[in-house]
């Protein structure tokens, strides 16, 4: 239920918060940005598939597993956020937001915001 409420809240903010939220992203670019997120996560995962990162709320190094097969893709100026989730070892789900940009024809992750969707929403409002 909490996941559904979070998704609905995020969708509502996307729809009314700022015109940039409503911008369309082509299916091709969605696929490319999602693949860049997957490659990024894989490059920072150990042999057991644990993705290692710093939790923005606790400022502690931790790990988790990809939890969202269909991440949301949201334009942000010349960048694109791929908004997903990670499941921690204790089963808790946290947000995982990957900022991507097209560099020489290939989308690359340039920033990761873990467990801090408020920061992403604030960035979108300020845009």
Image (cartoon, rainbow, N blue to C red):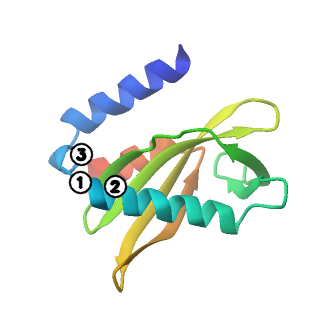
Label 2 and label 3: CA atoms lie apart by 14 Å
17 above or below 105?
above
First-in-chain label (2 vs 3): 3
Q: Which residue is mark 3?
A: 21
Q: Residue at x 45, y 43 (%)?
A: 71
Q: Residue at x 37, y 71 (%)?
A: 101
Compute the Cα span from label 2 to label 1. Answer: 6 Å
How many numbered circles are shown? Answer: 3
Which type of secondary structure does the marked residue at label 2 adopt?
helix
Residue 47 placement: quadrant: bottom right
Residue ID for mark 2: 30
Kindly check if marks 2 and 1 are in contact, taking CB atoms under 8 A apart as contact.
Answer: yes
Residue 25 has which mark? 1
Report x, y in % for residue 46: 81, 61
**Residue 98, image x, y percentages:** 49, 57
Report whether 44 appears left or right of 115.
Answer: right
Q: Earlier in the sequence, mark 2 or mark 1?
A: 1
Q: Residues within 10 Å of mark 1 (few under 14, many from 20)?
A: few
* Left or right for 34, reference 89: left
């Amino acid at each position: 239920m909490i996941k559904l409420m979070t998704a609905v809240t995020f969708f509502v903010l996307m729809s009314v918060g700022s015109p940039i939220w409503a911008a369309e992203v082509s299916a091709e670019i969605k696929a490319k940005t999602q693949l860049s997120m997957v490659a990024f996560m894989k490059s920072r995962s150990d042999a057991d598939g644990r993705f290692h990162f710093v939790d923005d709320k606790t400022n502690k190094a931790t790990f988790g597993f990809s939890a969202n097969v269909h991440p949301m893709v949201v334009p942000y100026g010349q960048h694109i956020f791929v908004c997903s989730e990670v499941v921690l070892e204790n089963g808790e789900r946290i947000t995982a937001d990957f900022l991507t940009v097209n560099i020489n024809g290939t989308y690359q992750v340039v920033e990761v915001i873990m467990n801090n969707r408020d920061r992403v929403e604030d960035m979108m409002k300020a845009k």
